[in-house]
Amino acid sequence: MPGRTVILLLLIGLVIAPAAADVIPPGQKTVSSCFEIGNTGEYPDYLFIAFPLSMSGGYAVMKPGDCVSFYKFASPSIYAVKRDAFNETAAGEGGQISSNYFSSDPGVIPSGIAIRGSATVAESSPVKSISTIYTITSVNSTRLGIIPARERYTYTDGRTEEKTLLPVETTVAPSGMDPLAPVLTIVAGSAIALIVGMRVRKR
């Protein structure tokens, strides 16, 4: 019976931890965030697909000038598919797409990046939204090379400002957000549940 209690507490910790990660720190506010690809026109033979956009799936074929929004815990990636090889029927209809399509279809080219969302800034900040602009560096049959190149800040007075990001092939969290915060919170929540469970078991 105590063993079941420990397992139950661990499960509760895993459920509660993501909710805790959603808590806005004091003195901070959330702003809308999205991502786009700035040079899709240089690769006219390919489609670039963002997936998943929600916890249940959902995808977007990325077009020039489109900034893609997504559910903050979804962590989408970007894939390339030859334009004449994209099988929308196999992928799914109505914006829903099967994860099996990306893992099993030989025509799908992964980038390996995981994009994180939900940006926070100081309450006094005039920032209204943050857009991360990616640049494609290469495409071959097995790998899509893509880097976060710039961040565009839109302010409450309508002004925009762009900042260049470091040229590393990885994902960069929007300003004011620690990319490891959700993971650390989940680990902490699980650890607390484990400690409580061990004490219950000793009794």
Image (cartoon, grey):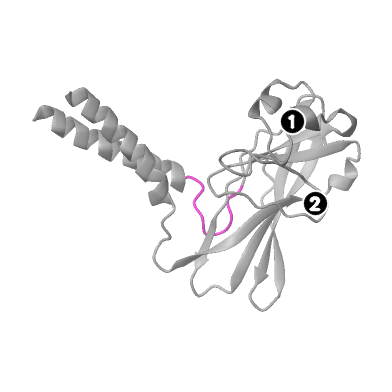
Give the amino acid at mark 2.
Answer: Gly
Q: Residue 71, position in %: x, y? A: 58, 49
Does the magenta portion include 176?
yes
In the displayed structure, would residue 59 be above or below residue 158? above
> For the residue carrying disc 1, how many other residues have a C-alpha within 10 Å: few (<14), some (14-19), or many (20+)?
some
Q: Residue 187, position in %: x, y? A: 37, 38
Give the amino acid at mark 1.
Answer: Ala
The residue furthest left is 203
Q: Secondary structure at mark 2?
A: loop
Q: Residue 31, position in %: x, y? A: 57, 63
Q: Which mark is residue 38?
A: 2
Q: Quadrant of the N terminus?
A: top left
Q: Along the polypeptide, which appears first: circle 2 or circle 1? A: 2
In the displayed structure, would residue 64 be above or below residue 99? below
Q: Nearer the viewer, residue 89 or 156?
A: 89
Does the magenta portion include 156?
no
Q: Image point 69% across, 28% down: which residue?
A: 102
Q: Nearer the viewer, residue 66 or 40?
A: 66
Q: Which residue is mark 1?
A: 91
Part of the protein shown in magenta: 172-180
Main secondary structure along the magenta-highlighted residues? loop
